[in-house]
Image (cartoon, coloured by chain):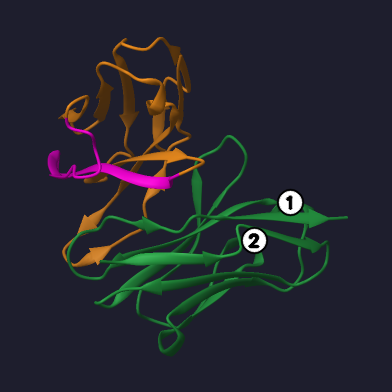
Chain colours: A orange, B green
Amino acid sequence: DARVTQTPRHKVTEMGQEVTMRCQPILGHNTVFWYRQTMMQGLELLAYFRNRAPLDDSGMPKDRFSAEMPDATLATLKIQPSEPRDSAVYFCASGLQSGGARNEQFFGPGTRLTVL
Amino acid sequence: AQSVTQLGSHVSVSEGALVLLRCNYSSSVPPYLFWYVQYPNQGLQLLLKYTSAATLVKGINGFEAEFKKSETSFHLTKPSAHMSDAAEYFCAVTEIQGAQKLVFGQGTRLTINP
């Protein structure tokens, strides 16, 4: 049963601390997306990768957020230093883009982050 | 730029009644359109998608949606609501050409009354 996995599922931390969220995309998928969900803003795209290369991170605060794909089976999203306004649910999604065809994105269960 | 508007942040229907969730999109290029469902404390699950083939798309759990280019709409319907349909529903758009990123609507929370 192929699915996107995310760790941790919940994270409570104090302002100023570093937070690292991890995502394992579905094996064989070549695109990975990071989204943030809040009550006020809804679902926002933070960054996405194709074949491990970052294509668009315009939705991400550059001064404190960073996203990487060390290898094809791991994507990370880091916040340093974290702030209370970063409290949200962070979703990772993966998909397969082949030629001109675009398939749906498969979402992980999310990481619920609370910054005190 | 693409955008999605979902009319009604909350919709409440009785069990067995018709479900209609509205979605209008804005796109300067041909779109792909999606409906996702989110159950409490879970990620998003694809219900159905429009990818420029048939304009009436059938999805999982008895849902379907019709792409109407003239109305720039992609409304989601289900003939008879079930208690298990209670969830939040998101409409999303992406371009057929170019970037694959999804632009989501604000979501509609569907409540089913017994």
Of residues A72 and A65, the one nearer the viewer is A65
Q: Residue at x 17, y 65 (%)?
A: B98
Q: Which residues are magenta?
A: A41-62
Q: Is residue A84 left or right of residue B43?
A: left
Q: Residue furthest left?
A: A53
Q: Residue at x 83, y 67 (%)?
A: B16
Give me the chain letter of mark 2. B
Q: Residue at x 58, y 62 (%)?
A: B60
Which of the two labelled residues, at mark 1 and mark 2, occupies the earlier sequence position? 2
Q: Which mark is residue A59?
A: none
- Residue type for callout 1: Ser
Give me the chain letter of mark 1. B
Q: Residue at x 44, y 40 (%)?
A: A37
Q: Is residue B48 magenta?
A: no
Of residues A39 and A43, the one nearer the viewer is A39
Q: Which residue is mark 1?
A: B84
- Crowding around mark 2 (Cα neighbors within 10 Å: few <14, some 14 to 19, many 20+) is few
- Residue type for callout 2: Asn
Q: Is residue A50 magenta?
A: yes
User: Are marks 1 and 2 in one subunit?
Assistant: yes
SS under mark 2: helix
Of residues A53 and B109, the one nearer the viewer is B109
Report if the CB atoms under discs 1 and 2 are less than 8 Å apart. yes
The residue mark sitting in front, 1 or 2, is 1
Q: Which residue is mark 2?
A: B61
Horizontal and vertical percent position of residue B76: 58, 70
SS under mark 1: helix
Say how many tags the image has. 2
Horizontal and vertical percent position of residue A34: 31, 39
As measured in the structure, the alpha-carbon distance from the residue carrying label 1 to the one carrying label 2 is 10 Å
